Every structure is written in structure tokens, then in C-alpha cells.
Amino acid sequence: MVVCQASKIHLPTPFASPSSSKTPTSLLFEPHSFSLALSHSDSSLSLFPSISFPFSSTQKSLSIPPPSSSSTFLLLKTQKSPNPRVLFVVAGPYKGGSKVLLRFFLYRNDGSKAFEKAKVVVSKQKGIEFDDKVGVLIDVSHGLKLIISGSVNFFALYSVSSSKVLIFGVNLVVDTDESDDGIAFKLMKFAVIDCLKPVFSISISFEWLVLGEENGVKVWSLRELVKGKKVKKVKNYGLSNGVIGDNNGVSNGGSSTSEIVSNGHLDGKIEKPSVSVKPRSGKHRQESAEPGACFVPFEPKEVKGLTSAKASSMSLKAISIQPLSSKRFLILDTVGDLFVLHVTDTTVGSDVTCYMRLLPHVMKVQMMAVFPDISSRRQTVWISDGHHSMHVVDITSAVNETDKREIVQAIFTSEKIQDMIPTAANSILILGQGSLYAYAIS
């Protein structure tokens, strides 16, 4: 593969200048709506819906004022609507960081192709309240760092100072393709994980929550996490890919009648006599060995110049997690090594089997990016040394447990790479020192 196109994107003022207080610092991209989010040095955000290339400096955008400390895109899916809704979630401190403020912006599916402030309905749960002037307030301390990660109908929020991971579910209250006016969604807290050890990265995707920890990762089944405490016989539509059903329920495709644990949000008919269930979130502990959870250590490796005893005592941290498929994740540790995490669940019960495999070396990786295209036979990863070098790597053979890893293309940039995000399997946006570049390969 060769680079067929490389172009500089001219950003709108006032954040086109490197000296501006609104200099871009990081990127997010959502492929369904083709939307781009730029985080700025003053903790504000710029949200560009339905971008196209060449990128115009007059591209319309939504400015989201500070403070924002973390953000994510979220897809809202239901069985009634084949077209998913796109939600942008922004987290930041409130009242000196004593609480976390969540703000939500919905992408309109009509011809306007714009984001607007979303209408929110909040469940009556302890620790969540809605303020129509600012947004949704979560009763956890913001602290110095907050991480938020979204997937389909669920997102996870980690507060370092509170040592908690919170799992939230989102469900459309009004589901129609005819008009976006009047559409609202319901927010509910499904689970809380108390953490005794620090978490360095989070990925919530498909049916799994993966927490980056010291010397490995903790894997949780999303199905187990969102269960409540009451058991009922229901007409169940499952939970594949973390999809909440239309009637405040959890659903996925194939129908079966089974005993499942309800959190009061089920898509299906409860067997008579029906009993109402007060919405409540499940509580879990990070170090517990409960069903649907397992810790996966990094594969042992030799470190040049160190004895085996010293090497084994080194503390490696999982600092980045990217989904490769429904059962595989790419993990980056603090020394720049890449691992593939394989996750499988048993057909009976809730046992989870996981193992991790070290990938062959190309460079000491400082950042990585994966385009989530599970339909492709090739597994391409974009990696960078954090300076001026980026490699496009085909890891298909390595993921399939052979030792081969092929460098598809090496790209060198004039500016130091600050962040990068793929927009397709063969194209990527690279953020330099205040400048944005688009690369396409073929």
C-alpha cells in the first residue's frame, strides 16, 4: 500500500493559530454520522457534523463551552428503528469538582445534519439529578482526572478521586424517523464498580467492559454488570452488543423465554402476575472474582539488561484499549508493547475465558488507533512513536496467532504527532502541533 493523498486541513479561526488559547489538543471521530470532535486547550470543544473532504474552513460546527475533561460518542439503537441515533456526551467538573456534570448533544437525522442540545429524562436514582440550566449532575467527585468511554446504548465513567466506575444506559423515549422534534432519551445508572486499584484506560464495546490496570486488564461481561437483583420470567430478547430495548428494556435480536435478572428495564412481557421493580444499580468490586469477570495478566516477556526477577517485578500499565472485533481488543502498555486480548464466554452460564498475546515488535508504540470495521478480512492498525513517524500495520496474521506482522506503509510527518484518529479503514486524521492533516492510503 502507498500513500495516495496527504493534505492539510485548514481549521476555522480562532483555533487555527498554534498560539491561540483554543489550540486543538485531541480528536474524536464518529463514522456513522461522519462527525468530528476537537478538544481545545481551554477545555472547550468544537463539534463538526457530517464532515467531508476537502475540509472547508467554513464548515459549520457546534461550540461547546468549557469545562470539559472527557467526551465520547454514543450510538442509540432500538429494534424499531434501523437507523441508530448519534449522541455526543461531555463530562466535566461542577462546583469545584464536587460533582460531575454530563452534557448531551443529539445528532439530527433530518436534512439539517446538525447537533443540538438533547432532551434528557433522568431515572429516580440516588446520586443522579437533572438541572435544566446546566445538565445532568452525578454525585461523584471529579478530581484531577475523569475517563468516559461510550459504545452502543451504554457508556462508562471512571472517577479517579472517587475510585468508582459507573455504567450508564441510554434509551430513546420517543422513537420516530419522521421528525427529530420532541425526541428525548432516558438516562439510567446500571452498575457501580468500587475500585481499590487505579484504572488507566477504559473500553466499553460490544458485550464487554475492559479496564486497563497494572500488569494487565480486568474484563467484565456487560450482561452481568447490568443485571439487577430481582429475578423474573420474561419474554427475553437478549443483550448482544449492549442494546437497550424500546420499552426501557434490554434487547438484542433472537427471542427466547428464560429466567433473567431484571433491573426494571426489560423489553418484553413479564409473566403474570407482574411485579414492578424499582430501578437500582448493581454494586460490584474491582477485585472480586464474581461470574462474568476475570483479570488477564500481560504475557511474560524478557527485558534486555534486566534480570528475570527485576523484569517480573516491573509494573506495566495498560494505558490504551481499542476494540478489534466482538471478541478481541488491542492493548498498549507503558513501555510501548502491543497485546491482543482474546475474550470468550461459555454458552452455558456466565463464565468468561480470556488470554492475552504479545504482538511482534515494530517500534516502541506511544499511540495507536483502530478503525472498528469488523466486516473487513484485514486487520489494520495505525501506530506512532509519538514523534514524526507513523506506521500502518496489517496485524491479521498476528491476531490469528501466527508470528507474522506486516508493515503496510511508513509515514513521516513534518510536525510532531499529538493525536490521530482513523476515518475509514484506509484513511486517518493526524493532529500535529496545532495543525490537522488527512492521510489516505491505497
Image (cartoon, grey):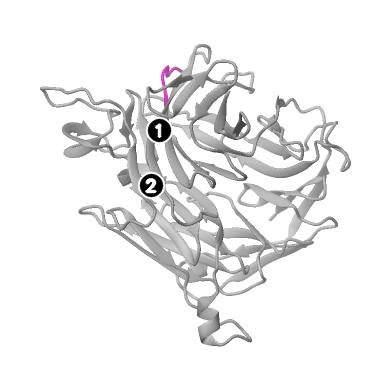
- Compared with 133, 5 (above or below) is below
Q: Residue at 57% x, 62% y: name it.
A: 332
**Which of 439 and 107 lies nearest the eye of the viewer?**
107
Left or right, 197 with reference to 143: left
Tell me the amino acid under the disc marked 1. Answer: Lys
**Which of 136 and 227 lies nearest the eye of the viewer?**
136
Left or right, 56 with reference to 255: right
Residue furthest out toward the left: 273
Q: Which residues are magenta?
A: 171-176
Q: In x, y percent, where is residue 325?
A: 46, 53
Quarter in which the C terminus is drawn: bottom right
Q: Which mark is residue 372?
A: none
Task: Let me know if residue 60 is in the magenta part.
Answer: no
Q: Element under label 2?
A: loop
Location of mark 2 (residue): 207
Residue 347 lies in quadrant:
bottom left
Q: Earlier in the sequence, mark 2 or mark 1?
A: 1
Q: In x, y percent, where is residue 421?
A: 66, 48
User: Can you see residue 255?
Assistant: no
Circle 1 Cα neighbour tier, 10 Å, few/some/many (<14 / 14–19 / ≥20): many
Q: In x, y percent, where is residue 207?
A: 38, 47
Left or right, 200 with reference to 423: left
Q: CA distance from mark 2 to mark 1?
A: 17 Å
Tell me the amino acid under the disc marked 2. Answer: Glu
Location of mark 1 (residue): 189
